[in-house]
Image: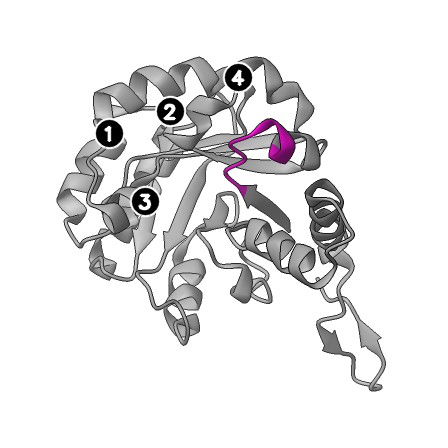
Amino acid sequence: MRVYLAGPDSNLQCDAVRDMPVLLSFGYAKKVALELAPVFSSVLMDSGAYSAFSTGKLIDVDEYKEWSQKWRPVCDAIAGLDSIDGDYKKGIENFRKIPWSFPTMHDTDPMEILPELIDIAYQNRIRPGAKPWIGIGLKPPRQGKERFIREVCAQIPDDIHIHGWALRAYTHIRRLNSVDSTSWWRDAFSHKRDLPWLTMGECLEIVVKKYKRWERKIIEPDQNGLPFEGE
């Protein structure tokens, strides 16, 4: 399980997530120099569709295509410009416009389109021979939607990497190969409030340590009642 930390948009944040998997969102990521990519262990590029949905700002798919192509050599995967408001046909059109971007299935989409998205995932590999990706996204509120996630995961072939957008609460679903977290920056501010003698950089270090140890978190007991990390 890889937990991507979303959107470092300053030198402080970039330094804090050195050697970690990072999600860069189109728009915010423009503040991150391409030369910084080797600082991170891996990079996932987000189209910024949710930010556009929540703020009402439109994202030009051609601009995103041109910009993402520059980052393509250094990214693990690049998300397609999806449609969160239920206009799944527009989303599919955008996925096909950027042939190296992976599609996302939302709980606002009809389940009938999943086979088409799976086909697009196989076609739209970031590089020839690369592992195909597909995303799962939930329109807020995200709580109580585990049945939908499991239903989608059950229909996606095992050779496709599944990324859960802002689905850190569902990491116990082992079919999710990676998720991203948008709360890490807010958590750092909470530490700063509770521990005012620490610098902001030191608060970020505490949060990053939590994510680095995430895979070792005890999540369920075994049959003998002893804790273990399942896989």
How many numbered tags mark residues here? 4
The amino acid sitting under disc 1 is Arg
Say left or right for 189 vs 127. Answer: right
- Report which residue position mark 2 lands on: 100
Q: As shown in the figure, which amino acid type bears the numbered disc 3?
A: Ser
Sequence order check: which comes first, mark 3 or mark 2? 3
- How crowded pointer 2 is (Cα within 10 Å; few <14, some 14-19, many 20+) is rated as many
SS assignment at label 3: helix
Inter-mark Cα distance, 3 to 2? 21 Å
Give the residue type that dot 4 points to. Answer: Ala
- Indicate the quadrant where residue 137 lies: bottom left
149 in the magenta segment = no
> Residue beneath label 1, please?
96
Tell me the residue that label 3 is attached to. 51
Q: Which residues are magenta?
A: 6-13
Q: Nearer the viewer, residue 92 or 58?
A: 58
Residue tagged 4:
33
Residue depicted at x 32% and y 47%? 50
Binning the other alpha carbons within 10 Å of mark 1 as few (below 14), some (14 to 19) or many (20 upward) gives some
How is the model colour-coded?
A: one colour
C-alpha span from label 4 to label 2:
21 Å
